[in-house]
Amino acid sequence: MALPLIHFDNVTKVYQMGDVDVPALRGVSLAIDEGEFTALMGPSGSGKSTLMYILGCLDRPTEGTYCFDGQDVSRLDRNALAEIRNHTLGFVFQTFHLLARTSAEENVELPLLYAGLGAEERRRRARAALDRVGLADRMHHHPNQLSGGQQQRVAIARALVNSPRVIFADEPTGNLDTATGVEVMELFRELGESGITIIVVTHEAEVAGYARRVLEIRDGLIASDAAPPAEQA
């Protein structure tokens, strides 16, 4: 059997607030296969964001082991974690984090600029990513010339431009109206069906319903691990 792409073994995370230890994760073990579409749900303070930060190599566990594609990344230094993020992972956030004075194409090119690619290759990949999210005709528009849904699509194109194996989306519909949120989640569904592993952090059941698997996080532990209700019916 193939190893899971993501494997946590008894992962804990403790933050220090002055002299006080604040546990955020209390011994989480889980496995996520390549190509799975997973939602992380839970109330504020449940640990779901901490879990995403560690999954996305933005933070390290206090104890326990995190293996990504068979490699123990739990104790890698910042440079090694950044290398994994830049070449393997993509991120989409509630606030789109687009540069206001640059075009959609230039925003999408940014990860490639950091990776040292030449201008022609950056342009080719950025345009392909924008075409994939349905914005080929908006590549020269600036963020203030785009709707909220279009800006989020630019952010998704930027996450796609390095051909990531995993895309993390943190409350990706939080700043969108209902109809636009549906369009964005349908896009994530399509990306998941193409083989990309999608991990969405959300507090909305409607958003989690697009996933094939829902992990409910409470008090730093996985309280439930199941298909969403529509899948179970």
Image: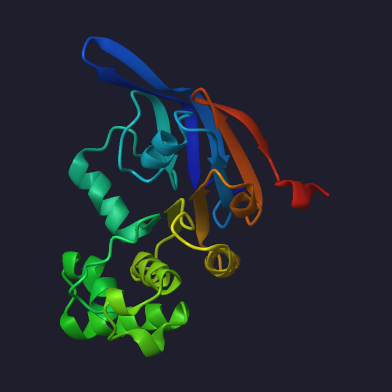
Which one is nearer the viewer's eye here, 80 or 100?
100
- Name the outermost residue toward the top: 19
Residue 188: percent from the left, percent from the top? Answer: 54, 64
Q: Give the residue displayed 49% in from the left and 58% down from the top.
A: 173
Residue drawn at x 24%, y 49% is 82
Q: Residue furthest right?
A: 233
User: Up-down: is 155 above or below 64?
Assistant: below
The relative height of residue 186 versus residue 232 in the rendered view (above or below) is below
Q: Count the numbered circles shown.
A: 0
Report if residue 165 is visible in the image: yes
Q: Is residue 71 visible?
A: no
x then y, percent, for residue 73: 34, 39
Residue at 33% in and 23% down? 62
Which residue corresponds to the image point at 70% horizontal and 47% vertical from the top-left?
Answer: 228
- From the viewer's side, name the closer residue of 7 and 105: 105
Expressed as whole percent of the image width and height from the top left, the position of residue 151 reads 37, 70
Q: Quadrant of residue 68?
A: top left
Which colouring convention does the figure follow?
rainbow
| Left or right: 69 in relation to 17 | right
Question: Between residues 98 and 1, which one lies in front from this camera angle?
Answer: 98
**The image quarter in which residue 120 lies:** bottom left
* Frontmost residue, 158 versus 35: 158
Query: Does residue 158 lie above or below 13 as drawn?
Result: below
Q: Position of residue 37 (x, y in %)?
A: 58, 54
- Classify residue 190 by image quadrant: bottom right
